[in-house]
């Protein structure tokens, strides 16, 4: 018997499926921009490139920098401050 995978997308098919209103990524979502210091929410859009770990879904953070086409977002996880590099597709206001 083969052991099943326990990767980061394990048991997430219902959360990450494409909904009726989210059929594709529009150009507006791909070209979003945020200013430094802006408060953003981490969300999962259909598109897996650069997607953060599902445990950070719905978390709020502050944009502290830009790295290539992605943004550096600082969040609080319990007492620790973490910096995540996330593309603009997976960020919302």
Image (cartoon, grey):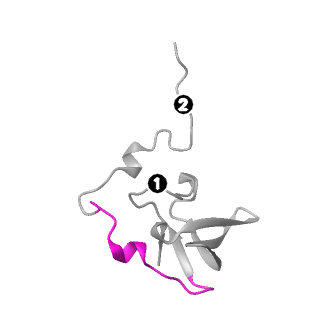
Position in image of residue 70 (x %, y %): 57, 71
Seen from the viewer's position, the closer of residues 12 and 77 is 12
Q: Could you tell which of marks 2 and 1 lies nearer the N-terminus? A: 2
Q: In the rendered image of this protein, does residue 53 appear above or below residue 39?
A: above
Position in image of residue 51 (x %, y %): 52, 57
Counting the numbered discs, the total is 2
User: Which of the numbered marks, if any, corresponds to residue 48?
Assistant: 1
Residue 72 lies in the magenta stretch: no
Position in image of residue 89 (x %, y %): 45, 68
Decide: marks 2, 1 in contact (CB < 8 A)?
A: no
Position in image of residue 24 (x %, y %): 30, 62
Q: Secondary structure at mark 2?
A: loop
Q: Secondary structure at mark 1?
A: loop
Residue under numbered circle 2: 5
Mark 2 Cα within 10 Å, few/some/many (few <14, many 20+)?
A: few
Q: Magenta residues, as a range?
A: 22-38
Q: Please, which residue is most extreme toward the front here?
A: 68
Mark 1 Cα within 10 Å, few/some/many (few <14, many 20+)?
A: few
Spatial distance from mark 2 to mark 1, Cα to Cα? 18 Å
Q: Is residue 8 left or right of residue 77?
A: left
Q: In the rendered image of this protein, does residue 78 appear above or below residue 68?
A: above
- Which residue is painted at 45% across and 60% down in the image? 44
Seen from the viewer's position, the closer of residues 14 and 24 is 24
* Predominant SS of the magenta segment: loop
Comparing labels 2 and 1, the label whose residue is closer to the camera: 1
Residue 35 lies in the magenta stretch: yes
Q: In the rendered image of this protein, does residue 35 appear above or below residue 18?
A: below
Q: Is residue 22 left or right of residue 31?
A: left
- Which residue is painted at 56% across and 38% down in the image? 7
- Which residue is painted at 46% across and 54% down in the image? 48
């Amino acid at each position: 018997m083969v052991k099943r995978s326990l990767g980061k997308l394990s048991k997430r098919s219902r959360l990450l499926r494409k909904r009726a209103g989210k059929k594709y990524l529009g150009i507006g979502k791909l070209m979003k921009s945020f200013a430094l210091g802006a408060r953003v929410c981490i969300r999962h859009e259909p598109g897996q490139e650069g997607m953060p770990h599902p445990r950070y879904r719905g978390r709020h953070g502050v944009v502290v920098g830009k790295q290539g086409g992605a943004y550096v977002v600082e969040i609080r996880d319990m007492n620790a401050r973490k910096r995540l590099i996330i593309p603009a597709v997976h960020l919302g206001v």
